[in-house]
Image: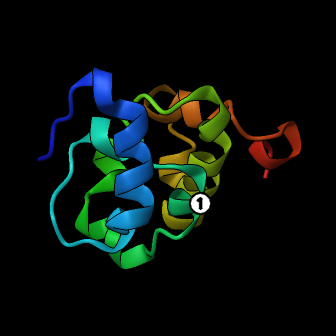
Amino acid sequence: GLYLPSLISPETEFISGYKFNVSTSSQDYSASSISKLPVDAVFTISQDWFNQQDLTTKLKDYSFTPKPSHLYAWYKVAKKYLSSDVMNSFTDYSKLILAGSISEMLT
């Protein structure tokens, strides 16, 4: 995986998300690096890339720490690509599930 020093995180977020189009890259990225993607890049994640990066596992990783303002985008991507059984695993995906609206959590 790719590990980035926290001092360059804001710049790396911009560069990786836009310049290098990380959300379509075949390189394996760490949960920490993926969590730094800008919202625009999160919404471009495809089912293939989601599976290739094993996001089912990485979204539960302790190092997956997106900005609070990015959690809703990650919630929408997780809801789109994870089965309802997995999304109903509150313990594993609590930070994402809590980012959704109450009506979305109930469906």
Q: Is residue 38 left or right of residue 56?
A: right
- The answer, for residue 83, to whether it is visible in the render is no
In the image, taking residue 101 as reference, residue 59 lies left or right, namely left
Q: How many marks?
A: 1
Residue 106 visible in the snapshot = yes
* Picture layout, residue 15 above or below residue 101: below
Label 1 neighbour load within 10 Å: few <14, some 14-19, many 20+:
few
Placement of 27 over or under 66, stated as above or below: below
Asked if 20 appears above or below 90 in the picture, the reply is below
**Which residue is located at x 29 percent, y 46 percent?**
57
Percent from the top left, x then y, of residue 106? 80, 44
x then y, percent, for residue 50: 37, 65
Q: Give the residue type that dot 1 points to.
A: Asp
Task: Tell me residue 99's x, y (percent).
Answer: 69, 34
The residue wearing badge 1 is 40
**Towards the viewer: 97 or 46:** 46
Q: How is the image coloured?
A: rainbow
